[in-house]
Image: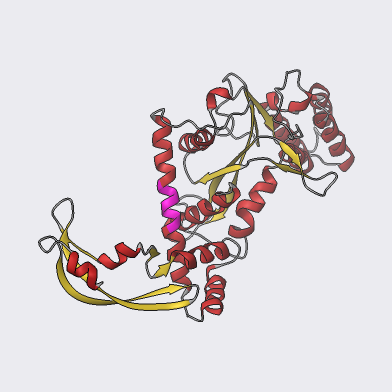
């Protein structure tokens, strides 16, 4: 600090005296003093800086060191802020409030959000094109409804929930080490947001373009529950939509009066026998014509399946030529989205009477999707 004071540009850096600082680290709290200087920024406005901090390249988030911040983020992805604060106290013997942990997550999450905004801007300008080349890309998406708090609660309706959209991309399936029948999706990337449909699809496309050379992708297979925002790319060359098998099965279970009838319907659609499935569903509508409640449920099911008619045949049963996957990868049935929603978002952010602000939810969701993407 003395060396920096002696070598500084006297005209540009006015010594304003010594200031103490406390930095919380994984080894405990570090206290030190250094000189503060008054200077001008690029706009000619006064600003105060610490030459010693710049020289040492002390990277902190507030009074938290980056190594401790990393530990906080790792814990907060698994457990609430209060428990994370307690774990930090046990680890460092320093008491930090859950608000301090929350502030760290917001700072890191804000950076990820800024990166998303920059990514979308570059994508719109045609300046985003990754280097990885694949012929086939699998894409799945769904929404998860989270309880919101305060001013971020929906203004209309009785529900306090807001839909967080989630999308994942991957290149195929590979066998899980040590398991004969276990498989993992390969090179998964994920993104999430409270955006409207158009903006979220832009983020989704930008997330793909950031990693992949999109000109080399011959086929994209999209799996989802049939919401319009998931099917927005339909009509483009090489894009194929499949209605998510889980949602098909759940809709049939909820709408069909008898378990045996439901089992038969599921089997028909699972085998790609769509015409036969609709024919059997029509028979059920006639059978329950005199029961208004059962008839309405079956009618709702018929409309749902009809609106997604093109996606009812599983992609592996369609008459289309599938490009060769990279070595070690295999084609398998789509339908990992419920698992992804659960593992990436729901386990941490849903249930236990939790509620969120939009800012708090998206910042934590960005950290969770970054982890899922291997970042």
Q: Is 269 displayed left or right of 157 in the figure?
A: right
- In the image as oriented, which residue stretches furthest toward the right? 260
x then y, percent, for residue 108: 44, 57
* In magenta segment, residue 111: yes
Depth order, front residue of 306/123: 123
Q: Quadrant of residue 189?
A: top right
Quarter of the image where the N terminus is located? bottom left
Residue placed at 70% from the left, 48% from the top? 339
Q: Which residues are magenta?
A: 108-114
Residue placed at 62% from the left, 61% from the top? 351
* In magenta segment, residue 238: no
Residue placed at 84% from the left, 38% from the top? 262
Q: Does residue 1 appear in the picture of this structure?
A: yes
x then y, percent, for residue 44: 13, 54
Depth order, front residue of 261/195: 195
Depth order, front residue of 90/150: 90
Q: Does residue 158 appear in the picture of this structure?
A: no
Residue 327 against residue 91 in the figure, above or below: above
Q: Quadrant of residue 268?
A: top right
Residue 87 against residue 165 in the figure, above or below: below
x then y, percent, for residue 367: 52, 54
Q: Main secondary structure of the magenta part?
A: helix
Q: Is 247 displayed left or right of 51 in the figure?
A: right
Residue placed at 48% from the left, 35% from the top? 206
Residue 233 against residue 24 in the figure, above or below: above
Figure disc tally: 0
x then y, percent, for residue 181: 84, 44
Q: Is 115 displayed left or right of 268 in the figure?
A: left
């Amino acid at each position: 600090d003395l060396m920096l004071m002696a070598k500084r540009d006297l005209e540009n850096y006015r010594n304003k005296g010594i200031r103490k600082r406390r930095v919380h680290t994984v080894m405990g709290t570090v206290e030190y003093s250094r000189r503060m200087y008054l200077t001008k920024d690029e706009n000619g406005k006064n600003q105060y800086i610490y030459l010693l901090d710049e020289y040492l390249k002390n990277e902190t988030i507030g009074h938290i060191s980056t190594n401790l911040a990393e530990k906080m983020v790792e814990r907060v992805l698994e457990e609430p802020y209060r428990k994370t604060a307690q774990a930090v106290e046990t680890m460092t013997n320093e008491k930090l409030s859950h608000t301090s942990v929350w502030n760290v997550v917001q700072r890191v999450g804000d950076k990820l959000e800024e990166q998303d905004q920059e990514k979308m801007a570059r994508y719109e300008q045609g300046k985003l094109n990754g280097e990885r080349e694949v012929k086939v890309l699998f894409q799945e998406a769904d929404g998860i409804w989270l309880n919101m708090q305060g001013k971020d609660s929906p203004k209309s309706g009785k529900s306090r929930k807001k839909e967080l959209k989630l999308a994942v991309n991957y290149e195929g399936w590979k066998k899980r080490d040590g398991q004969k029948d276990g498989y993992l999706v390969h090179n998964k990337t994920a993104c999430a947001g409270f955006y409207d449909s158009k903006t979220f699809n832009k983020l989704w496309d930008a997330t793909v373009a950031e990693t992949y050379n999109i000109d080399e992708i011959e086929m994209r297979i999209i799996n989802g529950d049939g919401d319009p925002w998931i099917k927005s790319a339909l009509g483009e060359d090489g894009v194929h939509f499949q209605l998510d098998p889980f949602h098909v099965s759940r809709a049939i279970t909820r709408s069909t009066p008898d378990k045996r009838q439901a089992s038969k319907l599921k089997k028909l659609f699972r085998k790609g026998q769509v015409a036969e499935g609709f024919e059997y569903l029509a028979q059920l509508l006639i059978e329950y014509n005199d029961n208004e409640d059962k008839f309405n449920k079956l009618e709702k099911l018929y409309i749902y399946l009809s609106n997604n008619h093109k996606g009812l045949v599983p992609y592996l049963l369609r008459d289309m030529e599938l490009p060769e996957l990279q070595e070690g990868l295999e084609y398998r049935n789509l339908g990992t989205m419920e698992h992804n929603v659960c593992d990436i978002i729901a386990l941490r952010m849903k249930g236990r009477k939790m509620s969120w602000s939009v800012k708090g939810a998206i910042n934590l969701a960005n950290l969770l999707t970054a982890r899922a993407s291997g970042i």
